[in-house]
Amino acid sequence: MSDLTSPAPLLPIASGARVRAVVGGLLRQHPGRAAAVAALFLAASALGIVMPACLGRIVDAVSSDAGFTTIAGWVSGAGLGVIGAAVVMLWAVRVLTGLVQDMLATLREDVFASAMRLPVGAVDDGESADLLSRVTGDVDAVAEAGGNVAPTLLSAGFAIGVSVVALTALDPWLALAGLASAPFYVLGTRAFLRKSRVVFREVRVREAARSQAVLDAVEGIETLTAFNEQEPALERVRERAEASIRMQIEGVRVTNRLFRWINGGELVGLAAILGVGFLLQSAGAITVGAVTTAALLFHRLFGPVGQLIFGLDDIQRAAIGLARLVGVIDLAPAPVARGTDAAPQASDGIEVRDVTFHYPTTGRGISDVNLRVAPGTTAALVGTSGSGKSTLARVIAGHHPPTSGSVHLASSAEAPYYLSQELHHFRGTIADNLRLVAPDASDDEIAAALRAVGAQWAVDAMVAERDGGAASESAVPLDEGRIQQLAVARAFLADPEVVILDEATADVGLHHREAVEDAIAALREGRTAVLIAHRLQQAVTADQIVVFADGRPTQRGTHEELLAIEGLYRDSWLAQTRSTPPSPTPTGQTPTGQTPTTETETP
């Protein structure tokens, strides 16, 4: 793979014009403070040229044997200029910092609000790590640029402008001599911008791709182990990490080339000013002090020019970060459809007919899938990460509209209840958390739902709170197991006909897994369920098991039927049970094909 070939496009990135429009809109919200910032930086830069001018006057005073009083006056003027410039600059930075922080606060709110409104399909299409890197890494990059880089670059810009005007006013020939450095700056900066615009954008994209590979490997470790796919997953992490490192090294090379251009420009420009100054002074056109002032003014440009050009690195990073953030803001929610049929016919349970769905940018998805789940039964979908099992579950749930085919639910069923692996605990009491799905539920109904999923501890906490005891619901320690038990109880209280369980125990530790799996078993009872299993032991009690690979079902049957034939399921089951014996089934019986052992957990 070429170093400049990026992975598949992720979430959209806004154009430069759109980014400038957003920044301009944020500035227009604070016109007075923006004007004050410009005036203060201009004043600080004007005071900054007082010292070079006074030093030139001191040289002339010494050359002409002026008195102590004259020299002391110019020394005092130089000191007052330095102090005044520092004070006004601190004032300007303070005002600018407040302005930038307010603008960033508005931008953060817009980005996070937009991210929360994104449809599931848009997030999955761009891979979750891309959105994560935007609302973390890109926000941090823009905040750092706004808080640290913006004051430096504004100071440098005004200092350059004022110094050039002062040098021209001193003598136009000296100003023209200083322009000898301009080709070095222009050529070096153009080469840097042309290359860095691509490189730094690729750095961010590759970092997101690397993060996604790590997330897939960590979150899907048990599935990868079951299907003996650890090595390909680790290879994918290694390849993406190496690609990210190579691109960062290329970024350092691009910056080092810029350093050489800038240093060359400084050398040529200063030499030209001193040479022209020598000729003018020899002809009596200017004094030695004027040449000294001109050299000091040009030397004073070294720092600001370097800051401005070197700051292009941070500007590029911030610009790319802003473009990625504005891309999140501008991403319009997509309409959600249930299928491509104009009037889907009612069916019992769940029926998936010739469903195809592919994410537009990554090309991942499912093709020509047919599945029927009878009422009151459970279908377990198993397979490696990216095999299509979770995509099918989300199509059934209505998160993704099928590209072709259709999904049919029982005529009386509403949208399926979707329970994912992510842990969510909301503010308030246990009862408040459950009433999110049933606002009018009584305490007795909530207690019944909690008991049904084995959460007696939550019932006891509710009773203690109601009776005014020492313990209270808010004081109950909530670990990941209890949080997920409450999530299952919430689903139980909603009482859906169809429930989709997308690796609901993936983020639950070993010590809590049995309690959560018992709760899920209670939720499945009497309901139509689709179970995404990251461990094959979870699929044992399902009425049918569907093995996915490359977006298509490759095997179907019960646990016993699949163990009886050669295939991926049998190979994976034998590989997993040799290393990670399963938890007892809800009935307490050992599944067919497995010798009872003590449960252990592979890292």
Image: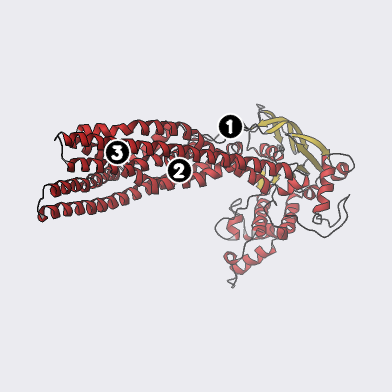
Furthest-front residue in this view: 282
* Colour scheme of the picture: secondary structure
- Residue 571 visible within the image: yes
Amino acid on which the number 2 mark rests in the picture:
Asp
Q: What residue type is labelled 3?
A: Leu
Q: Is residue 373 visible?
A: no
Foreground: 422 or 103?
Answer: 103
Residue at x-position 80% and y-position 35%: 554
Question: What is the crowding at mark 3: few (fewer than 14 residues within 10 Å), some, or many (at least 20)?
Answer: many
Q: In this view, does 282 lie to the left or right of 525?
A: left
Local secondary structure at mark 3: helix
Question: Which label belongs to residue 458?
Answer: none
Q: In this view, does 327 lie to the left or right of 290?
A: right
The residue wearing badge 2 is: 110
**CB under 8 Å between callouts 2 and 1?**
no
Label placed on residue 5? 1
Label 2 neighbour load within 10 Å: few <14, some 14-19, many 20+: some
Q: Is residue 354 above or below residue 56?
A: above
Which one is earlier in the sequence, the residue at label 2 or at label 3? 2
**Viewer-side residue, 370 vs 69:** 69
Instruction: Identify the element where label 1 is drawn.
Output: loop
Residue 341: image location, x then y, percent: 67, 27
Residue 506 pos. (x, y %): 69, 51
Q: Farthest right residue?
A: 564
Residue under label 3: 270
Q: Residue 139: image x %, image y %?
A: 47, 45
- Which SS class for mark 2? helix
Residue at x 30% of width, y 41% of height: 301
What is the distance, in whole Å, between disc 2 and disc 1 at their CAs?
Answer: 31 Å
Q: Quadrant of the C terminus?
A: bottom right
Q: Distance between the residues labelled 2 and 3?
A: 48 Å
Quarter occupied by residue 489? bottom right
